[in-house]
Image (tube, grey):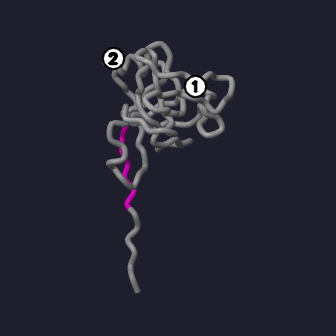
Amino acid sequence: DSIKQAETTLLVEKPFIKQENIISWLNNKFKPDTFFKIATHEIRSFENCFISQIESDALIPLISSAMYLIIQQDQNIKNGEFIVATNMQDVILRKVYKEGDDVYLSSINPIYKTIKIDKSWIIIGKIIDARLFLT
């Protein structure tokens, strides 16, 4: 008989930053005061992360405004990833589409136009998880 060890669940605490505070936070003008714990089996997967909820119907039905998004601050994005980006006025949620050196931000919802990334856009990070509940 073999004895299997149960996977250990770790709780990782990360800041929750409301959508309207993300730009201020990026500019070091906002200090988060709310933190949530994320249950995980791998602590390294949540490095350089924060949590937010983004008011957007651009990626429904996959991601809704009710979901807590775990966003990893990383500008190294790949085709097909879901990301949060800003033009320093709006914070948006989109899917990455790359064609050669050009990067486009598209939505599932057809009412939104595809955006070609230029110097006015900053990739805040990629969605590494979306959850309805946090601890």
- Look at label 2 and name its amino acid: Asn
Highlighted range, magenta: 8-14
- Look at label 1 and name its amino acid: Glu
Q: Position of residue 109 (x, y in %)?
A: 66, 30
Question: Residue 73 appears in which quarter of the rendering?
Answer: top left
Q: Depth check: 102 or 19 in front?
A: 102
Which secondary structure, mark 1? loop
Q: Assign the N terminus to one quadrant of the image.
A: bottom left
Is 126 drawn above or below residue 7 in the view shown? above
Q: Position of residue 116 (x, y in %)?
A: 51, 22
Q: Residue furthest front?
A: 100
Earlier residue among tags 2 and 1: 2
Q: Which residue is mark 1?
A: 55
Say if the magenta span includes residue 29.
no
In the image, which disc is placed on residue 27?
Answer: 2
* Residue displayed at 38% across by 71% down: 5
Q: Depth check: 48 or 1 in front?
A: 48
Left or right position of 133 against 57: left
Question: Residue 107 appears in which quarter of the rendering?
Answer: top right
